[in-house]
Amino acid sequence: MENQVQKKRIFSGIQPSGDLTLGSYMGAIKNWVAMQDEYESIYCIVDMHAITVRQNPADLRRRALEQLAQYIACGLDPQKNILFIQSHVPQHAELGWILGCYTQFGELSRMTQFKQKSQQHADNITAGLFTYPVLMAADILLYQADLVPVGADQKQHVELCRDIAQRFNGVYSDTFTLPVPFIPQMGARIMSLGNPENKMSKSDPEGCVYLMDPPEVIQRKFKRAVTDSETAVKFDREHKPGVSNLLTVYCAATGKTLEEAEAEFSGQGYGVFKPAVGEAVIELLRPVREETARLLQDKAYLESVYREGARKAQGIAQRTLAKVHRKIGFIAR
Ligand code: ATP
Ligand code: LTN
């Protein structure tokens, strides 16, 4: 018990805006699983973030449940971690509003993700898309998280969250724990298999590998992966982005170092290398896919996990929210 009190806390989340990919697995989920014994961990399915761009309601509902099954299938134990759905804990929206009043327009205008997404969705640039990082700050700060394991693309958002927390603490005295982003050494930024200049993304079906892709589809995607006109399997991000990306995937999947992987494929061409990467990923994802399919048969179990998760999350979140209300001068309910 005493030990538990001292554990540091982790918070992270993924949007159910598309099916989970190898990028989110290697950039985020893999670390969540590795850290679950050492930290008190809270993992969220951020459906409120997903609606910052238009979603089909039936797909959103299906994906949120599938994502919960995938979290568990990847190895997150619901007994050890709090797993919940963001919209089930109203404190996120409540703190989000408040923090918006401590965030500068200029800060939000500088966010890279906002600039990219507003280009991709030029016909529907909503206020929600703009204030997305404020809601993300609320997610993290409600739980007084010490560490936020995410891929490299989310570092800027976690840093903004820190700035908001620091500002609030400065005005009202210590209220929020300042979170630190945790970015993996290997796999922080998996690139698209079709265009290794771009991040692997849910919305690019041929360039990404979905956790639920069957083995033959995974193998096809790796065999077609864009490389270069040379033959050497060498890590060189600038001149050989495709091969470097495949080496990163291979190492993240097998636990080997870059040197070990380069030595293993030295003197062998891409015709041997690419299917070997495919095979490593197939073996990595096989248990995840099979366990997800099994869990999705048991809706009652999944329901019990997200209900219990929301109950526990609300307990923690409400404590922080009440403290915030007191500090800013709201009358107690
Ligand atoms: P979209 O492309 O629609 O923005 P996404 O595929 O980037 O979505 P997110 O839900 O935004 O997925 O990301 C979930 C988590 O996975 C985040 O922590 C993010 O940093 C990480 N992540 C996403 N894509 C990658 C990637 N290609 N490499 C490493 N980490 C990634
Ligand atoms: N913006 C993140 C998802 C996200 C998140 C969070 C991550 C929403 N709230 C809190 C960590 C902590 C993304 O992956 N695009």
Image (cartoon, rainbow, N blue to C red):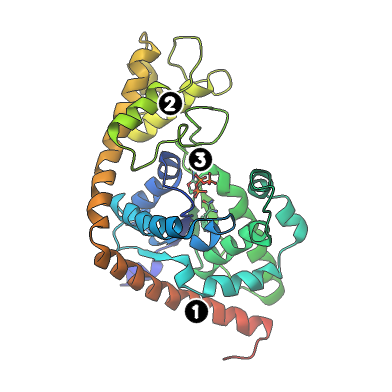
Residues packed near mark 1 inside 10 Å, few (<14), some (14 to 19) or many (20 plus): some
Give the label, 2 or 3, closer to the camera. 3
**Residue marked by disc 1:** 318
Q: Residue at x 40, y 44 (%)?
A: 25
Question: For disc 3, does the CB lie below 8 Å from ligand 1?
Answer: yes
**Residue at 47% across / 32% down in the picture?**
207
Q: Report whether the residue tagged 2 is closer than 8 Å to ligand 1.
A: no
Amino acid under disc 1 = Gln
Viewer-nearest residue: 87 or 176: 87
Please state which of residues 172 and 11 is positioned toward the viewer in this rendering: 11
Question: Quick check: 156 left or right of 101?
Answer: left
Residue where numbered disc 3 is placed = 201
Q: Is residue 1 left or right of residue 45?
A: left
The one nearer the camera, 247 or 39, is: 247
Say which residue label 2 marks.
Answer: 246
**Kind of residue sitting beneath label 2:** Leu
Within 10 Å of disc 2 (Cα), the crowding (few <14, some 14-19, many 20+) is many
